Image (spheres, grey):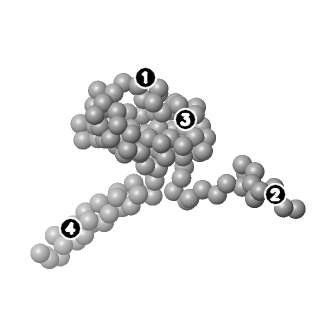
Amino acid sequence: MAFAGGARGAGAVRLPAEVNRILFVRNLPFKISADEMYDLFGKYGPIRQIRVSSSPDTKGTAFVVYEDIMDAKAACDHLSGFNIMGRYLIVLYFSPSKQTKKSDLASKEAELAEMKAKYGEA
């Protein structure tokens, strides 16, 4: 059975592997409020959670969790490079594997330094 005009149903959409419901947002204005975040990102669909970082070393970043993956994709597509309060947003899909790779690398480097100290390597 052929589809008219080659159109497919919504269930047939194939998304890239990195696409998920969690967005990592960088370069946020430091003075942006939670309400402003919900107003901006809520235009693309229902939001489960927004976590704006308040620690000095991660200030200007946030995680936005959408209910639906297609809403997250729309927000990422439309808000990446969006100018708000004089800053251009960097919107990426959250990748837990990148976070674990960073922590694994740090632990391996610490282990290597420990071994070098133990065996007298410079």
Q: Residue at x 61, y 41 (%)?
A: 68
Q: Residue at x 55, y 59 (%)?
A: 17
Q: Quadrant of residue 112?
A: bottom left
Circles 3 and 4: CB distance less than 8 Å? no
Q: Residue at x 16, y 70 (%)?
A: 117
Task: Name the image quarter holding the C terminus.
Answer: bottom left
| Residue 121, x across and y down, in percent | 14, 77
Q: What's the residue type where badge 4 is placed? A: Ala
Position of residue 101 in the picture relative to residue 110 (left or right): right
Which residue matches tag 4? 113
Q: Is residue 80 above or below residue 53?
A: below
Q: Earlier in the sequence, mark 3 or mark 4?
A: 3
| Residue 81, x across and y down, in percent | 38, 44
Q: Earlier in the sequence, mark 2 or mark 4?
A: 2
Which residue matches tag 1? 35
Instruction: Check disc 4 and report its element: helix, strand or loop.
Output: helix
Q: Earlier in the sequence, mark 2 or mark 1?
A: 2
Instruction: Check disc 1 and report its element: helix, strand or loop.
Output: helix
Whole-angstrom CA distance, mark 3 to mark 4, is 47 Å
Which residue matches tag 3? 44
Whole-angstrom CA distance, mark 2 to mark 1, is 43 Å
Which class describes the residues within 10 Å of circle 4: few (<14), some (14-19), or many (20+)? Answer: few
